[in-house]
Each structure stands twice: as structure tokens, then as C-alpha cells.
């Protein structure tokens, strides 16, 4: 096999592996849900936050837990965006908020 063919095959292999692994890394995590809502209540002692969710498929007043650091940054009336560790809209269960955006 000539060196040109070897280089071409090597290039195709690297391109294919890079494309497949890049697509896998860029894909959204199916075990997380991105939500938007307005904070209605914050209890820094229990680290519980009540949010009025405004997503198309997930609306209503829901309760979430946060870290102590984030509980002090959240203010009632503030619009926030965050992730939860579930692919489903939370019912009555308390889910943990992560990657909170919009907190002061």
C-alpha cells in the first residue's frame, strides 16, 4: 500500500472517530432537564426553593433543593434557569437544582 493511501485511510479514521465522539459529547444528557421559572420562596435554613415553572411541558409551582451557597443567592421574584437530575417534570418530589443561571 502506498504512503498516500495510508495517510488517507489514517485521516478518514481520525475524522470518523472525532466526529462520532464529538457528537456524543455535544448531545444533551437525557437524564437532566433544563427548566425556567420565577422564584417564589427561599428557605436558606432548609435550602428549599419554591419556583413557579414556566416551561411549555412543565408548568406550575414546584419545590427544589439547592446548595447552601445557592440558597443565599436566590431572591423571590427573580427569573432563573437551571437543570434538575431528571428527564421528567417533577411532581411532588423534591429535585436538586444545578447550574443555576440568573441568580445574583
Image: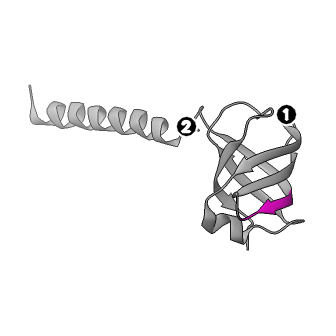
Tell me the SS state at disc 2.
loop
The residue at which mark 2 appears reads as 27
Asked which quadrant contains residue 14, the reply is top left
Is residue 25 toward the left or the right of residue 88 in the image? left
| Residue ID at (73%, 48%) | 64
Whether residue 102 is in magenta: the answer is no
Asked which quadrant contains residue 89, the reply is top right
- In the picture as drawn, the residue positioned furthest to the top comes out as 1
- Residue 16, percent across and down? 35, 32
Q: Nearer the viewer, residue 20 or 97?
A: 97
- Residue 53, percent across and down? 86, 46
- Mark 1 or mark 2: which is in front? 1
- In the picture as drawn, the residue positioned furthest to the bottom comes out as 104
Above or below residue 48? Residue 70 is below
Main secondary-structure element of the magenta-colored stretch? strand
Disc marking residue 57: 1
Is residue 40 toward the left or the right of residue 24 in the image? right
Above or below residue 78? Residue 13 is above
Whether residue 41 is in magenta: the answer is yes
Above or below residue 29? Residue 49 is below
- Residue 39, percent across and down? 84, 59
Q: Earlier in the sequence, mark 1 or mark 2?
A: 2
| Residue ID at (70%, 57%) | 46
Q: How many marks?
A: 2
Contact? badges 1 and 2 (CB < 8 Å): no
The quarter in which the C terminus is drawn is bottom right
| Residue ID at (9%, 30%) | 2
Q: Nearer the viewer, residue 59 or 50?
A: 50
Q: Residues within 10 Å of mark 1 (few under 14, many from 20)?
A: few
Span of residues in magenta: 39-44
Disc marking residue 99: none
| Residue ID at (61%, 68%) | 69
Amino acid at each position: 500500500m502506498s504512503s498516500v493511501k495510508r495517510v488517507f485511510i489514517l485521516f478518514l479514521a481520525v475524522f470518523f472517530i472525532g466526529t462520532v465522539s464529538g457528537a456524543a459529547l455535544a448531545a444533551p444528557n437525557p437524564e437532566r432537564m433544563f427548566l425556567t421559572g420565577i422564584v417564589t420562596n427561599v428557605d436558606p435554613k432548609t435550602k428549599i426553593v419554591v419556583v413557579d415553572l414556566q416551561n411549555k411541558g412543565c408548568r406550575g409551582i414546584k419545590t427544589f433543593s439547592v446548595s447552601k451557597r445557592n440558597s443565599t443567592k436566590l431572591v423571590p421574584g427573580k427569573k432563573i434557569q437551571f437543570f434538575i437530575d431528571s428527564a421528567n417534570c417533577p411532581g411532588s418530589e423534591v429535585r436538586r437544582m444545578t447550574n443555576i443561571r440568573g441568580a445574583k
